[in-house]
Image (cartoon, coloured by chain):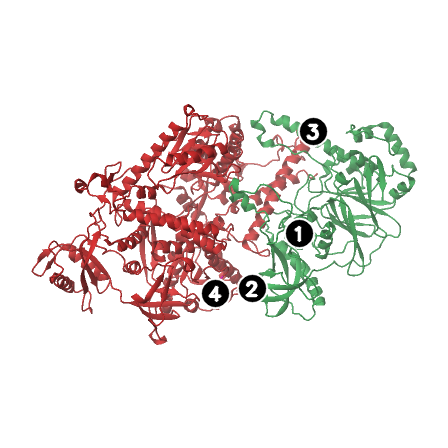
Chain colours: A red, B green
Amino acid sequence: MYGVTMGGNSVLAHITGFDPYFYVAAWEGFDPSSNDLQLFKKALNDALMAENRHRGIKHFIKKVECVQKRSLWQYQFQKPRPFLKITTAIPALVAAGRRLLERGLRIGNIGSMAFSPAYEANFQFILRYMVDKDIISGGWCRLQAGKYKVRPARAKMSRCQLEVDVDAKDLMPHPAEGEWQKIAPIRILSFDIECSSRENKFPEAEIDPVIQIANAVQVLGEKKPFVKNVFTLKGCAPIPGAEVIPSEKEANMLVKWKRFIEAVDPDIITGYNICNFDIKYILDRATALKAEEVAYLGRIKGSKSTMRESTFSSKQYGKRENTETTILGVVQFDAIKIIRRDFKLTSYSLNNVSAHFLGQQKEDVHYSIITDLQNGTDVTRRRLAVYCLKDAYLPLLLLEKLMLLVNHIEMARVTGVTLTYLVTRGQQIKVLSQLYRKAKGKGFVVPVRPRHNTDDKFEGATVIEPKKAYYRDPIATLDFASLYPSIMMAHNLCYTTYIARHEVKNVPAHMYERTPLGHCFIKKEVQEGLLPEVLRELLAARKLAKKAMKKETDPFKKAVLNGRQLALKISANSVYGFTGAQVGQLPCLEISSGVTAYGRKMIDETKRLVEEKYTMANGYKHNAEVVYGDTDSVMIKFGVDTVAESMKLGEEAATEITKHFTPPIRLEFEKVYYPYLLMNKKRYAGLYWTNPVKWDKMDCKGIETVRRDNCQLVRTVVDECLHRLLVKKDQNSAVNYVKRIVSDLLCNRVDLSMLVISKALSKTDYAGKQAHVELAKKMSKRDAASAPKLGDRVAYVITQGCKGAKNFEKAEDPIYVLEHNLSIDYSYYLDNQLKLPLTRIFEPVIGKVSMLFQGEHTRKIKLGRAMSGGMMKFAVKTEKCLNCNVPLKRGRRTICVHCEHLLPVLYNKKLSIARKKEKLFNKLWTQCQRCSGSLHQDVLCSNKDCPIFYRRTKVQKDLKEAHSILDKFDF
Amino acid sequence: MPMGSPRTMSSNQSLLERLDNKQFQKELEAFKKQKVERVATKTEIRKSYEVKQKSFVNQYAGLYFDRLMALRKDLAQVAKEKWPDVPQVKKLISIPEGRCVLLGTVFKESKLRPSVLEEYTKSRSERKNEEISKYVSEDDSLVIEDNHARIPLDFTGVTSEGKLPSVASLPTGIVLAVLGKNNTRNGEFVAEDIVFPGLPPVRENRKIPEDEQYVVLTSGLRIGAVTKQMDLQLMIDYIIGLAGSSIDQNKAAKIAQVIVAGNSVVIEEEEDAEYAHFKKQTKDENDKRVNEGIKNAMQDMDLTFTSLASSVNLIVMPGEDDPTNITLPQNKLPKFFFRSAAAYSTFNCATNPCGIEVNGRVLLGTSGQNIDNLAKYTNADKDIDYLERTLQWRHLAPTAPDTLSCYAFKDGDPFVITECPDIYFAGNQEAFSTKIIEGREGNKVRLVMVPEFSKTSSVVLVNLKNLECKEITFKSTQLKSN
């Protein structure tokens, strides 16, 4: 077990005296007083020995005992039964033993029999240990004085500062309460590497060298890193605040870095995409360079880090392919993994993530420039190093800002699962761990259920059909607090209370309750289920944590408590999912389908109660109407005019209706939406009020503003429309705004960067032709060097193209479009991008939405003119009147005789365009300077995710054009 | 016209009417014959702020580089005089331990400064709506950089000689030398004292006028807006010698030069002409209406300047709201605006900023954007301090390009002040204020904050002989001279 002391020293404790074990149910006629036990032990031991897999072990089975336990599975009439507890020599034998026993074993003269299911045989040894000894990951343990031995330096296996031997019984865990809630001074190393590349190819570890490795080391809970350094290949000019460690040879640099890691002795390493890129690249590179030493990254001496490809799939998190590297004793906490899992963003590039969470755009140096900088001088390499250092530091800022590590530690404490499992495994392990902890105390044993993939679908949550409309009056929302957990608690739904169908007749009717689906569960007065008890404790703990959080003043401690209450909430909510996970550890659809059935009933019940009680007949001003309901909430239009009245009725209704349900089910009044735009199921927006004075925020559900294949225009327009509808409550201005945008689009006035769509080029052989793939091909024909490579994001806009061209043929590089003045395919953007989301928003507001896309404002269409190519080669350029486009006579440059009286207004128009562009030029380019952190060096950034990237090129061109027109007036 | 006669504001077009009036023309002719001989004026407008070949592909880095290079040598000299024993660091990439002097450009990190990124990335309801007038906060911090590296400055220290200037008083873009010591722990440079390049050198062999003669500085006439029409007329009458006592008239005769420092005209903003096609009002009607408005304002301006130029030397600089480009340097107003005034050789348009030599005196000034921007991003006790500081920094507009938009020059930074002016001014200020400061060679520099006429009804008179300076206020009821 690895850990740190309060003083920050690293410790490795070798724990002895704890052996793996599992259970099977004793056979019928088993007699504990006879030598049945001995016979059993011998039979199993012999069978294992016959397999001849584990050499050097004398006694495979250490012990077999008889214990009285109850199976967790189904109601056992509260009677314990004899179980055999089988203790094995090493963890791997648990699985082997279970396999043999399930298959069938001949036991002495008693006969042959199969033991199925086995109990608690598929539980990770490490968790088994932690559960049994009440140890939690991320918590504190005490080594009792005199009960442990410190290993002398020569006997140490690891690089930890302290190495001790201790017996399992002498390690005292502290529950994470009181002073033991504080978080240990964990050392976090964050790093980032830069590689050079050939001719703009993505770097390959066999060929392309690592040129820089930047590191930042911080102690969790402290403000700033205490080490920042960068290892560079070839010299590098000094950087204030960071140590520069140059090497002439790449292998030396890698070795120096590896020794640096040893010296730092981090508990956690982090970075951005380190698992799938940086660590892998370094190890591959070390192999290529034959610098073997580098591969020994772990804390155990002589443990080589090895890699394997793994696929991680989870119902909640989706499927991911990963490279897993073993680094013993160090937790790999890759920021990209966590952020990908927990947040929904348009792009997970470090640029975008830091722009989103930290509010800072990051300079993005294209990898072709990286090689140039590396091949330059000490000063250019320094520039690269500064960039690299920033990339190493950003993950630390992200961890801190999003409280990722703290929240994970709290989650580890709550669920009793190790940090590594939390990062690499799904939800189930967390629930399983808690279940084991509870089961152990109650004398239950958990069966290993055979996995069977069924397609049994059970009905999900209910949705009350939405009455789509734009509500200009307050809509009160009632929510069931922790709906699914409270249903399980109220109706005592658990493995241990479920009565198998054929057993129901044996249970007196007053002892059980039937779910709406007809399954029977023991009432809690008879025996409280295990899951309800787990949930009850989780929710009680959450209440406590929230209370403590309110009182806490220290911001870090507050954040820790917040992490705790979040962890508790998530844990409580995942219990339901655990019972419903069909390929999971312990699925029990009788529970999960029962939960949703109760949920559906309650929503319908609530609707009925509200609409019965709040009527004019009962003396209320209006008849209340439930306009929508989903899973755990109902939206009610009480018909009142003010938020305050709506709140009062909402609160009253919540208290009133709660009385109709079994505690702890509780209906809460939380918020009022006013106004409220209900577009469809799971699709609505409204201003969110929790007090009658000022609204808290705009709450939008299911509005696709974050989908990546939407261009920025869609997001901006949707955002602005909602703002005008909800905040300004002015539907005319929203309609006019849309008309104006449509007109802008048709007249080519929309900024190009608003129209850029981007997709990652993940493979080149898609089944159908795809716009971004075709464009990448086109670009590599034009210039192979700058074309996007596999893994790059391809940014494109849809242009007019030839008549009848397919969309994928019309995709074009935005920069190319700018340079060649190509016209945009406005109809694509109108029909494929804007129409659907705008129709959704406006349908409830104005009914027929065709007026948005047809009418006066769409009459004028202006296409960009190509300045080169095609017919333009044969065209003779003549000056035209700036006002009426009549070709001008010789000697006139600006305006024709007939328009001359309009000269001032014309000048003024052209001038105001030029002035706007001048200001924009200034704003954009100075912003880029600020981001890149230098006034004196040209901006190199090529971050295509940045909203400025295309704009700043466009403005250069616009400005040139605007000024050349202005110059014509100078006579 | 008799002084003090009450005139009503109903005659908005009085200017035009009177000029068309034959009777008035006659009087004017008669007056011209009998007026006192004007002083001779020799004016030269410097061309340094004219942009010849415009190109918009440059970035701003070159400008900062040239600025630093232009000031570095003199700054090193000043620093050497002040701290003779402390070594100066050549490049900011390697900073020795112990005390040393760093030379470089300042950049101010500021959270308040508006960011264009926010406009693009934040959703509508997240954005801050109101604009604030001061972007100065406690959290601001400074870094110093040269073309090699950037180093954060720790400005919390107190020197033996006194306190460091506050971070709030220093903007981005100035070039300075800082004495201090590197804190190797956090990489910050602990500043003890700083020094600026100081006032630029004076040109040798200057010829200062021996007799009394005046320059009139004014700004913010805002012709076309309906305010202060009468006061403006009074002002013109006074300058061309038609008003006041004979003492005033004598004085008027000694006006060698009138400089209008920006914002001469107000042009009505068009309302979204681009969307006219789906509104009721047709495009042509809209154009016509706006055209009339602009034409009238232009004509008024032309006539005003004609009446001035017919009598005195006149230089018109553009200002922020004038019809020319907006980034500094602003181009001259186009000639076609001045059909009538342009006929006079005494009428000249100039750039903003503008350097002018009048009868041997060097004048340098702007229409005020540089000072307004400094006032947004820095603090000062008195407004005139901003003006004085720019001279100490030897730079007209240090916040350009960072927060004040300017052209991305590629050959040299023209805003670096290479020659010490005798009169240094900024137009369009809230109120008049002035100060004399002394240059390195003991020369005197007259600093003038030129008030905005449309607000104060006053102009500034500076005596070229002795640099005495005063404000004259024109109120339509009385003429006040102080």
Earlier-in-chain disc, 3 versus 1:
3
**Magenta segment includes A138:** no
Residue B187: image tag: 2
Disc 3 versus disc 4: distance between alpha carbons?
Answer: 68 Å
Q: In the drawing, does residue B9 fall left or right of residue A837? A: right
Q: Nearer the viewer, residue B206 or A848?
A: A848
In the displayed orientation, state which residue is furthest to the left.
Answer: A109
Question: How many numbered dots are placed on residues in this image?
Answer: 4
Disc 3 versus disc 2: distance between alpha carbons?
Answer: 62 Å
Neighbours of disc 4 within 10 Å: few (<14), some (14-19), many (20+): many
Q: Dot 4 lies on which element?
A: strand
Residue B159 location (% of width, % of height) = 67, 65
Q: Given contact means CB atoms under 8 Å apart, are the residues at marks 2 and 1 in contact?
A: no
Neighbours of disc 2 within 10 Å: few (<14), some (14-19), many (20+): some
Q: Amino acid at mark 3?
A: Glu
Q: Amino acid at mark 1?
A: Thr
Residue with the mark numbered 1 = B378
